[in-house]
Image: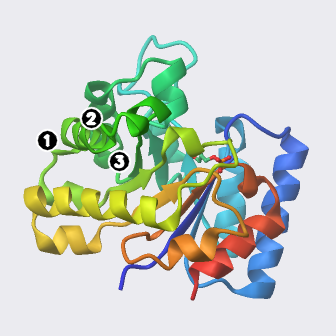
Amino acid sequence: MRRKIVAGNWKMNLDFQEAQDLVEGIANLCEEKQPDCDIIICPPFPYLEMTSDMADDTQYFYVGAQNVNDNDSGAYTGEVSAKMLDSLGTQFCIVGHSERRKYYNEDNALLAVKIKKLLEYQIVPIYCVGEVLEEREANTHFDVIKKQIEEALFNLDVADMENVVIAYEPVWAIGTGKTATPQQAEEVHKFIRTLICEKFGEDIANQIRILYGGSCNAKNASDLFAQENIDGGLIGGASLKAEDFISIAVQASK
Ligand code: 13P
C-alpha cells in the first residue's frame, strides 16, 4: 500500500502573519483529527524557516519549497539553491509546475537538471506534468505527458527514481473549479505508472506516488483518492484554509 500524500501549494499568497496563522491552524487540526497520511506544506521561500520550525516542533507535516535554481551557488540574483533549501530543513520541492513552465519558460531539459540537483541534497522532487486544454481537446495529452516524463525523469537511475513524487495537474483544471473527473485522472495516472514500469521496473512503479492536482477540494477529494492509481493530492486554493486542507488530509487517510 502506498501511503497517501496531501501537499499544499500556497503559491504567491499570504503575508507572514497570515502564513503563521495558517501553519498553526493546520497543526492544531492535525492534533485534533490525527490524519494518517503524509502532509506537506509548500509556502513561499520567506516562510520556509518558520514552517520548518513548526514542523520540527509538532512532527505533523513536512515542508516543501515551490521552486529551486538549477545551479549550486553563485551570481544568480534572486534565486534559491537546493543547498539553501536543505540547510533550512526542506524535505520536498515542487518542480515544473505549469505556472513556472508558462510564465518562466521552464522546459523539460531544465527541469531534469533541477530534479538531479534536489536529489543530490536528498530533497524529494514533486515533479508536475499535465496538458493544456487545447492538447486535451486535440487528444494529444498522453503524448505531452509522455514527453514530460521521459525528458525530465528517464535520465535518473533506479535509486534516484525511488525518491521522486509525480503530480498530474491538468492545466485546464488549475484554479478553474473544473476538476478532472476521477475517471479522467485515473486514466492518466495509470498511464504514467505504466511508463515508469516500462523504464524502471515494476517495484519502482508500484511504490512511486502520483498525486492529482487541479481544483481538488474538500468536496471532491475522496472520489479522486478512491482511484487505484491516485496517491493523494497537490492542493492549491483549498490549501489556504486549514479546515479544508485537513479535511482533504482526513479523506486521504481512509
Ligand atoms: P488549485 O487547487 O487552486 O486548482 O491549484 C492546483 C495547483 O496548481 C497545485 O499545485
Task: Write down the residue under mark 1.
Answer: 155
Which residue is labeled 2 in the image? 112
Q: Distance between the residues labelled 3 and 1?
A: 18 Å
Of the residues tagged 3 and 1, which is closer to the observer? 1
For the residue pair 245 and 65, the one nearer the viewer reads as 245
Q: Position of residue 249 (x, y in %)?
A: 65, 74
User: Up-down: is 162 above or below 151?
Assistant: below
The colouring scheme, among rainbow, by chain, secondary structure or one colour, is rainbow
Could you say whether the residue bearing mark 2 is in a helix, strand or loop?
helix
Looking at numbered disc 2 in the image, what kind of residue is underneath it? Ala
In the picture provided, is 198 more to the left or to the right than 215?
A: left
- Label 3 Cα crowd, 10 Å radius (few <14 / some 14-19 / many 20+): some
At 50% across and 23% down in the image, what residue appears?
102
Picture disc at residue 96: none
Q: Point out the tag, 3 or 1, that comes first from the N-terminus.
A: 3
Callout 1 crowding tier (Cα within 10 Å): few <14, some 14–19, many ≥20: few
N-terminal of the pair, mark 1 or mark 2, is 2
Q: What residue type is labelled 1?
A: Asn
Position of the N terminus by quadrant: bottom left
Residue pointed to by mark 3: 121
Q: Nearer the viewer, mark 2 or mark 3?
A: 2
* Quadrant in which the C terminus is drawn: bottom right
Residue displayed at 65% across by 68% down? 220
Viewed as shown, does residue 142 lie left or right of 74?
left
Establish whether ligand 1 lies closer than 8 Å to the Cβ of label 2: no
For this rendering, which residue is in front, 119 or 220?
220
Determine the CA span between mark 1 and mark 2: 8 Å
